[in-house]
Image (spheres, rainbow, N blue to C red):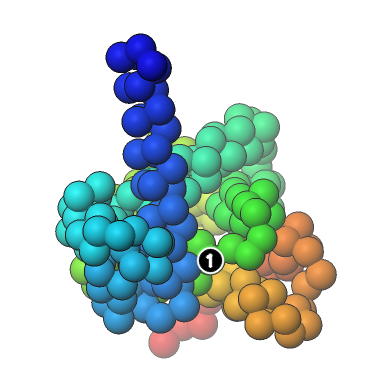
Amino acid sequence: MSAARDGGVRTDRVSATRGRILNTAERLFAERGVFSVSNRQVSVAAGQGNNTAVGYHFGDKLDLVSAIVRRHFGPLEQRRESLVARAGESTDIRDWVGCLVLPMTAHLDALEDPTWFARFNAQLTTDPALRALIVEEASTTSVREVVDRIRRCSPDLPDDVRAERHDMARNLITHICAERERALADGTPSRRPTWAATGAGLIDAIVAIWQAPVTET
């Protein structure tokens, strides 16, 4: 075997090993919680004879979590950029809310069943240290464009109300997707038959949140 071919085989083997580790870690983190699973447990569950395989390929726990986040947020951002371009100069808030919702629901729909990313993502949002990873990855040009467009569609909202409703929208997207994914994994009936229907329901609810009256306190 030539050196070049031998190097290619070795690269493919490393890539396959990294993929198995990422898949296994995402599943275990989604099911048990990030800090309830050790790197050693991930290595064993991924079928690695070397219990330090995670450290060798990725580093520490945060490095492994970051690798999972990046693997998903790249495709999410591509979907969002496409939706933003399609929305163009729309002044309909529903179009811009769709740019927040549909990348996630479409991404989950495109993944091979069963999926774990929605539950994994929900785990990160509830931990202060890990939430920073999500915030950093989500601070993209397209997200900032969507946020600005929603602001233009609701110019009369006070800043504190606007910030609160952004939080509501983010939490709805994160946890409704996680709940549907959990229902699918458990084999229990889901409130929405498809990810597309879930996306439509989320858009309806979030548009209603943005257009709700503000009660003076």
Location of residue 132 in the rendering, given as x and y in whole percent from the top left corner: 26, 60
The residue located at (62%, 71%) in the rendering is 181
Query: Element type at marker 1?
Result: loop
When asked about the image quadrant of residue 60, the answer is bottom left
Horizontal arrangement in the rendering, residue 194 relative to residue 205 (left or right): right
Q: Which residue is drawn at 38% across and 16% down?
A: 1
Residue 67: image location, x then y, percent: 33, 49
Position above or below: 104 against 16: below
Within-10-Å neighbours for mark 1: few <14, some 14–19, many 20+: many
In this view, 137 is above or below 215: above
Q: What residue sits 60% from the left and 77% below the top?
A: 182
Residue 216, position in %: x, y? 46, 83
Between 42 and 107, the residue placed more toward the observer is: 42
Q: Mark 1 points at which residue?
A: 116
Viewer-side residue, 47 vs 175: 47
Asked whether 69 or 15 is in front, the reply is 15
In this rendering, position of residue 123 left or right of residue 94: left
Q: Is residue 192 visible in the rendered structure shown here?
A: yes
**Residue type at the position of mark 1:** Trp
Q: Nearer the viewer, residue 161 or 2?
A: 2
Horizontal side of residue 161 vs 176, given as left or right? left
* Label total for image: 1
Position in image of residue 21 (x %, y %): 38, 56
Task: Please indicate whether residue 15 sits to the left or right of residue 35 in the image.
Answer: right
Looking at the image, which residue is at 25% across and 69% down? 40
**In this view, 177 is above or below 108:** below
Residue 135 seen anywhere in this rendered image of the structure: no
